[in-house]
Amino acid sequence: MRLLELNRVCVSYTPGKNAVNNVSAAIGENTITAIMGPSGCGKSTLLRAINRMHELYPNVETTGEILLKGKNVLRMNPMEVRRRAGMVFQRPNPFPTMSIYENVLAGYKLNGIRLGKNEREEIVETSLRNVALWDEVKDTMNKKGSFLSGGQQQRLCIARALALKPELLLMDEPTSALDPISTNRIEELLLELKEQFTIVIVTHNMAQAARISDYSMFMYLGDLVEYDTTKQMFTKPGDKRTEEYLSGVFG
Amino acid sequence: MGYGVSKLRFRNWKNKAFYIFVCVMSGITMFPLFFIIWELIKKGYKQFNYSFFTEVAPTSMDAMLAKMSDSVIPGGVLNGITGSLLILGMAIVFAIPVGILAGIYLSEKKESRFAGIIRFLTDLVQGIPSIVVGIIAYAWVVKPMHGYSALAGSVALAIMMLPLVIRSTEETLNMLPVSLKEAGLALGASYTNVILKILLPSAFGGLFTGILLAVSRIMGETAPLMLTALGAAAVNWDWSKPTSSLPLLIWEFYNDPNLIDLIWSSSLLLLLLILTLNLIAKQVANKWKIQ
Amino acid sequence: MKDKIFKSLLFFAAALILILTAGIVYSLVIRSTDAFARFGFWQFVTSPEWDPRPESEHYGALSFIVGTLMTSVLALFFCIPFSFPVALFTGEYFKGKKVASLVGSVVNLLAGIPSIVYGLWGFYTLRPIIISLGLNEQGFGVLTASLVLAIMIIPYASSLTSEFLSMVPNDLKEGAYSLGATRLEVISRVSFPAAASGILASYILALGRALGETMAVTMLIGNTNNIPSSLIDTGNTMASVIANQFGEASGLKLSSLIAIGLLLFLITAVINSIAKLAMKRIKS
């Protein structure tokens, strides 16, 4: 059984017009899968459908199956889905009223889960070590998260998602608002995190996909055009549109 | 060329003259504020003593005797201060929870038609003249209870406060980035928790500023209280009894030739309280500015 | 479950505004029916007579409607030469500078001064000036009231006008500058026309403010139940007659005063709605 399976997934914001059209794919554990494609191709919508964040928009309709460990997330309680599939966004968004420490634990606090002191300390330390932020912030744990640099903030947001020990980590262009050095650090981080977590990342940076992902999806106008190992796709794309996109004919 | 230097010079002159006009008139417009404050201080500081804050308003008789013997008018405005506290306190309790909840509703339902109507009505209520609000509270509370009361006064003030709280809540929440809400939901938090534990705390500064400004706006209201709380000579903490307030006391003093000297000190106090609230509100707004 | 309760709580809080407004209109209408039934709506609105003597009891609102319109429009007129320069100062000449926010804040604080304090100031400072100018023996009247009213509405007019002026796109102004226009010409030919409808809406809103002002006007207008014959004559506004006579009123007189309250509510509601709708259209 694969960790995540998509079966004929369709998402529409306006009736009769699919933003994501009949997408089927399966994703295995401890891999990084990149979803690429020009803007408006439906890649963000597909990602958000996995933890049902797309339902925040009005009049969304979703059909098909999205199976997380064999259970259809579209039939689950959305809050449970989101706890099990963590998400990191384009812009770092630490909670401005919470300290770094509280930010890491925000998921527990917001879900009303009480933890003992030792447990809390342990979760904070592991999560921050996971994102290589521990050494940088361990002495300023009570400062507000918004005092950190952009790259640090984004790592904090990843730590916040990891703290809930998700089965899947969804990332929506997590480096697009960052400088190249911070981007680099996060990419290195993702390669390390792969050992413990499964990552699906949306990016419109092809080089990034090539650098970090094991598998790549190419989406165009809502369709999943191609899904293969990254190596295969970047060397021998199976579809003309993929080839054109990768060679910069459009994008 | 038909375009003379003199014409250019005239245009420049006009431009400069207008600039000076704008600056001078703007300066003049700032005058009344300082003029009014100065006048109140000049005429009112003499009454600012310990008993001004600890004693109730004097009777007309006491004031007359004091004036005849050329001494300072005895008594103070304690019944006004406590009355204002009681009436404002109740108004705050009525208006703030409803105002914040309705404000959240409006910011959450930006596109809905019903929210549009509510938004329009909120503006409408905000525009209702205070004296008309007084009539309403009279009809809703004074009449059924067969008597003037602090409650009636606070209902009037709550009606005036409500739209201010709603709109400031809505505007503050609208300034928060959507990503904040998304981040909360993506962690699996319930809608309720996202709003109560993330959005409201993040908007705290704006909400608090809005509330302070709303309180400062209704603090000096006199007309609606004349029709509802009426006034009282003693300190009153009973919500069902007629109660005084600072502005009501000023009105009383103004209408009594023996007490008229007290209008300055009580107006000064009222104005200082209002300006202080305004300044605090500004400080809070600056400190809690949304990043 | 919890979310459902919370969501319905939000909805009820919002719906409460609807109920509140409906209740306000309902109460005003119900309690003024006596007066309208007795005199007829048009009679009531068009009769200038206000006679509380039991043998010839008759009430009409015209004097107060005229008094209200005279004071408010005059106040609006007086406030323009002050509020407009302030708006230009804060929204154009010194836009975004510290001095602009200082001037803006000071002028906005004018809105914080309670009506009754304005009344006192008008009574003790302005009235003697009016008397010494020989305009009026007692110093009360439409003119005195509207001068104070003008100061009171300056902040409302200037802050909104300034907002609309500062919304004029820079490209437009730069276009005019590049053709050699002076700043005044840019303001009068570009900024002002571009912001004109917004500015008009701001002043309509300020007018709405002036219509309902009570205490200061009550203390300065003279409180006589007649149509003011001139700007220096005394009179009453709709708000001031209610403030003055509500306490002792009962029966038909009370109903007539509430009827005036209803009329005042309707007038301000119409004026404010026009301004708000215009602003909404401009902003979107």
Image: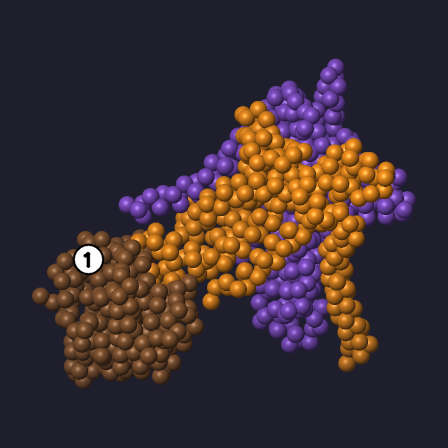
Chain colours: A brown, B orange, C purple
Residue at figure coordinates x 28%, y 72% from the top left: A125
Is B284 on the left or on the right of B190, as rendered? right
Q: Residue at x 55, y 64 (%)?
A: B286
Does the image show residue B16? yes
Give the x, y percent position of residue C237: 72, 36
Image quadrant in which you'd find residue A95: bottom left
Residue indicated by mark 1: A73
Above or below, comparing residue B193 to residue C212 in the picture? below
Density class for disc 1 (Cα within 10 Å; few <14, some 14-19, many ≥20) is many
C230 up-or-down from A89: above or below:
above
Q: Nearer the viewer, residue A95 or B123?
A: A95
Given residues A139 and B201, the one toward you in this image is: A139
For the point 75% across and 47% down, the residue is B47
Whole-percent x, y for residue A85 in the image: 23, 64
Q: Is residue A97 rendered to the left or right of residue A47?
A: right
Residue A101 figure quarter: bottom left
Q: Chain of mark 1?
A: A
Whether residue A237 is visible, yes or no, is no
Of helix, strand and loop, which one carries label 1? Answer: helix
The residue sitting at 39% across, 67% down in the picture is: A99
Residue A185 versus residue A220 in the image, above or below:
below
Q: Residue furthest top?
A: C55
Residue pushed farthest left?
A1
Residue A56: percent from left, percent from top: 32, 56
In the image, residue A131 sits, relative to residue B93, either above or below, namely below
Which of A212/A17 is in front? A212
Q: Amino acid at mark 1?
A: Val
Quadrant of the image for the N terminus of chain B?
Answer: bottom right
